[in-house]
Image (tube, coloured by chain):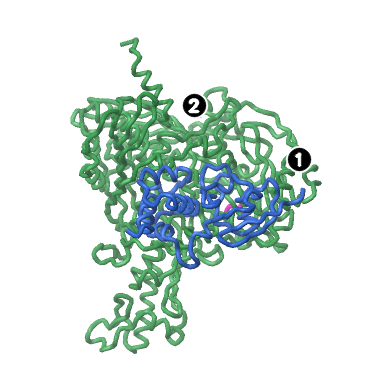
Chain colours: A green, B blue
Amino acid sequence: MTFIGNKSDLRVVGTRPVRPDGVDKVTGRAVYGADATMSGQIIGKVLRSPHAHAKIISIDTSKAEKLAGVKAVITAADIPNIPSEEAFVGEGPMNFRDLSLNCMARGKVLYEGHVVAAVAAISDTVADAALQLIDVKYEVLPHVIDVEEAMAPGAPILHDDLFTAGMTPKPTVASNVAKQVRFTIGDVEAGFKQADVIIEQTYTTAPVHQAYIEPHACVAAIAADGQVLITASSQGHFMIRAYTAKLLGIDIANIRVTNAEIGGGFGGKTVVYLEPLAVALSKKSGRPVKMTMTREDVFRGTGPTSGGTIYVKVGATKDGKITAAQTIIKLQAGAFPGSPINPALMCAFAMYDLANVDTLGYDVVSNRPKVAAYRAPGAPISSFAAESAIDDLARKLGMDPIDLRLKNAAKQGSKTVYGVTHGVIGYEEVLNAAKAHPHWTAPLGKNQGRGMATGFWFNIGGESTGGVFINEDGTVSVVTGSPDIGGSRASMAMMAAEVLGVPYEKVRAVIPDTASIGFTHVTGGSRVTYATGMAVTQAAQAVVEDLKKRAAMIWDISPEAVEWKDGEAVPAGANAGGFDPLPLAAIALKAGKTGGPIGSEISVNAQGAGPGFGAHICDIEVDPETGFSTILRYTAVQDVGRAIHPSYVEGQIQGGAVQGIGWALNEEYVYNKKGLMDNAGFLDYRIPVASDLPMIDAVLVEVPNTRHPFGVRGVGEVPIVPPMAAVRNAIRGALNLELFHLPMSPPRIRAAVDAAKMPKAAE
Amino acid sequence: MSKIHVTTSINGEPAEFLAEAHESLLDALRNTLNLTGSKEGCGSGDCGACSVLLDGRLVCSCLMLAAEAGGHEITTIEGIADGDKLHPIQTAFLENAALQCGFCTPGFIVATKALLDQNPNPTETEIRYWLAGNLCRCTGYDKIVRAVVDAAAEMRGS
């Protein structure tokens, strides 16, 4: 593949045009999940468990079935009881049996909000009334919410067939610890012996929800011949197709999924909750079924990311060379195994060139909703702890925190704890840009502090399909299988326009249904602009080759004698002949006479995604009386490889940073003693609002990824990795408070202020 | 129970519809009148995705009964543009890339219109506090605030 990303040659890439789907989204025309309808549709709703952990003794649906207007009632008895089967999907493992049991409980409910039955009825009102008539008898079991308590001897066991993987010999007693995993390089004990200074501390983080503003929604119908139509909002309509097929035992060819516009996902819409139930309800009722979650459903029934306990130990010599780093991480997986423990371990110290690293992790189930992916899954959790410890190390050494990081920075050739050697990366460039930013040296006032932290994310490639088709008038249609969650139609159209040499406005990008484009993996892992962009670029390049052949045919010269320049075929040189340039539109007009329609669809399994690094600087003012923190200034520097549409790249960085600020200061699940969530709404689960924040200065560093034609690295996930430690380190700077637990909410800060005032008895 | 007959004005046009007594204005707009531009993000008035103007005043349509719309003038996102001519707020949102997923965008645009109709030259702080009732999880609000500043300048003719 040729690298064509030299900035000085680019005409469209790097500009900031209006996105193709923009007008629909500012006028209310865009169709999101809950906006889609099917003729004759009825309303589906679910009944959720009121208990954190209980055995289902019986479910009596007879009264609900008899209610006028009720068309179907389903329970686990109506869903195939599929065997355990592991698959690696996107950024993490997925067990299809667990996914099925998470959509509909069988025999046991494992968290408050776990679905036990579903109804379909002619109206919302009737469906609600039907749910009230379903009689479920439970035997309430002891529950466990906290990760440490779930690991303790005698803890209530969620799954009696779950034995800790990764242990030798294989355990014979069931456990809530689904997996133990370790990545090691070098010898940490020897490394710590070389250290002059050691920081050792344990941190905790709370589970946080992706909190996309659009609740999950779908409409689905199954016809008498078994063919299924689904319209749903998700990060991958091929994902919806695959999971629905697997969970219900339907041939993939019999399912066609149209992706509605998606109202945010951040990883949370990479799994199914409603679609298999809607199809099962449709099968039983003979009608299309529409299902929409409420916000409360979203909080109680869908997956946040894990919270966890993170032990960190780092040691360094007096001159700031880190000699060893160690972490032990215990992550809540929710009701089924599958916390992002592996990436949490891998990312903790991936920013550093270290000889001795030891990371040990546990994937632990408890009576909470099954976790789902959330932006750089796992990395923000471990990085909060690691980057807090690195900052404390800098203080203890009396070193500037950026200088300490520069001294230990990972670079090309640095070996990671998980075995991969870094290629061309931009961490040092990012650190230098942060250090040179005026923010780093601006003055601070009373009760104000500045903190910084950095972060890493792999970014992924994977399977994508992109098509480029030249229309009869020379305009261009770009089709891909990647749902557009944040402006990717624009970047796809821009890359095609760049290669074809035509104006951006002549290229329109659309996302067809699963039967109309080749397989494409989910919009996640920061992969779309990279992998789908690669497919589109290659398709556009194939079209250019074809256009040159068509021009050669029209001119009756050899294709090698034709060049493509600025959207026109031109003779390659004087010897090729004295022909006037043939614009794209002129060639399109003659397509019928030169071989038929002009277009190319390319499927790739993109390798070589370039890792991303970010460095964030945060200024904060803390009121010691109230514990309230105000973010005064925030700068986020990131190596983005090459920004195709810089505004949407900045937007990813700004949005990711602000999600991280919410994670740092406010967001958490609050459980009562019965294991029930107390704050399942946006009033009590408080995400950042406009008045909480300053402008977020997104600084784009471009160290091109040579494995992508334009140099793209993924950008969406890195920005949520540094904020928690950046905010924590800023608070430390403001009030000299050491905080170890998220969120750093006003009561926590108040308590730390009070504790700092108390005389230390032992000293 | 029989439905209530509601006579109102929506986006400058007379409108009549039937609503259940407990039905929200948002549900009537979306399900009965097929105006799905107003979104439900929470159903409890916390996210602002359902924002509409009631006689020019900003309200959450999920917190208002459909029956209460009788005799009032309702403006939804579908009524902000002048036919095929976008409102300067809409143009500013597009040019500033002030939306990623776009789900919250109708609410933000309606809320911004209510702000600029009464305060043509708001400060950044005034914009941030006015829009504090509208949640956006994608953008971190930076580009939204810039879009509002630009739209205000455009509307003032400066």
Residue B14: in magenta span: no
Magenta stretch encompasses residue A243 = yes
> Within 10 Å of the Cα at label 1, are there few (<14), some (14-19), or many (20+) other Cα atoms?
some
Q: Do badges 2 and 1 share one subunit?
A: yes
**What mark, if any, has residue A395 been given in the picture?**
none
Q: Secondary structure at mark 1?
A: helix
Residue receiving disc 1: A133
In this rendering, would A311 be left or right of A193? right
**Residue A76 seen in render:** no
Majority secondary structure of magenta residues = helix
Do we see residue A130 in this rendering? yes
Classify A329 as above or below A3.
above
Q: Is residue A478 above or below residue A405?
A: below
Q: Quadrant of the C terminus of chain A?
A: top left
Mark 2 crowd level (few <14, some 14–19, many ≥20, 10 Å Cα): some
Residue at mark 2: A148
The amino acid sitting under disc 1 is Leu
| Foreground of the two, B52 or A91 | B52
Give coordinates of residue A752: x percent, y percent: 38, 22
Mark 1 or mark 2, which is nearer the start of the sequence?
Answer: 1
Task: Using the image, name the chain to which the residue with label 1 belongs.
Answer: A
